[in-house]
Amino acid sequence: MKQLMNRNGILNLITILIDQHPSATDFLERHLLHSGGVYDISKETTKNICSKYPGLNDKLIPEEIALASGLHDVGRILSANQLFHELRGAEYIEKNALKLGVVDSEIDAYRVAQMFRPHFLVYEQFNDSNNFEARKDFEYLDSSLLLPRTWPEAIVVYSDLSLVDGERVSVDERIIDIERKYSNTSNDIIHSLEKGKTRLLKLAERVEKLENGKMNGAEIMQYGFL
C-alpha cells in the first residue's frame, strides 16, 4: 500500500510553509479553504469516475489525485511573485516529497508533481513572449509538460476550476469569476485566459463526460494515465 499524505497532512504542511514565508501569512485562511475544497472535489470526482468504470480503479486512485489537488497551489506560498507558481510548487514537491512524508517513493513524488504542474493557465503564460525573462528558472522543462494530457492532470485542473470562495461551482462560473477579479488588476492573466479559455472549457467538458459515464473505452484510453 502506498503512503500518501492525507487531507489533514496537506493542510498542516501548508500552515507550516506559510509560517516559514511571512509574505504569505495573509493568504493562510484562503489557501486552506481553497486547497481543502479542491482536494474534496477531486476525490469525489475520481470516486464517481471509478464507480462508473470499475476497470479504472487501479489507474485512478482517488487519494493520490486528491493529494496532487490539495498541493496544487503550494507554489503560491514560496514566492511573492505568483507567476509560474504551478512550476515552483511542482519543483518543490519533486525535491522534498520524501522528507516531508508526502509520498514514500521518488517516482510517486514526480508523478504527483506532474499531476498538478499543468493546472490553470501555465501553458499560455510559459509561451507568452512577455514572460520569457521570468521563466528562465524553468527553462529545463519541456513545455509539453504544461498541457494536461492524462486523466489525473485533467481532474486536478477541473477540480481547481470548480471552486469559488469554498463553494462548488461550474467551470463556466469559475472562469467568469476570474475574469471579474482580474479585469482591472492583471492584464497578464486576462490575456492568458483569452488564449486558454476554450482549452479549459473543453477539458472540463471531457472530465464531466467521463464522470457521467458517457465515454467508451477507446476515448478513455486515448488520454491515458500517469
Image (tube, grey):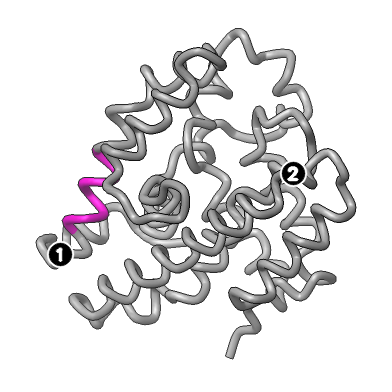
Residue displayed at 57% across by 46% down = 117
Q: Are marks 2 and 1 in contact (CB under 8 Å)?
A: no
Q: Nearer the viewer, mark 2 or mark 1?
A: 2
Residue 110 numbered tag: none
Q: Is residue 155 above or below residue 143?
A: below
The front one of 176 and 126 is 176
Label 2 to label 1: alpha-carbon separation: 38 Å
Residue displayed at 86% across by 46% down = 21
Point out the stretch of residues depicted in magenta.
Answer: 202-209
Residue denoted by label 1: 212
Q: Is residue 82 above or below residue 45?
A: above
The front one of 113 and 179 is 179
- Quadrant of residue 147 in the image? top left
**Can you give x and y, in whole percent of width and height, for residue 143 in the image?**
55, 31
Residue denoted by label 2: 26
Q: Amino acid at mark 2?
A: Asp
Crowd band around label 2 with a 10 angstrom C-alpha radius: few (<14), some (14–19), many (20+): few
Residue 203 on the magenta span: yes
**Can you give x and y, in whole percent of width and height, for residue 199 in the image?**
31, 32
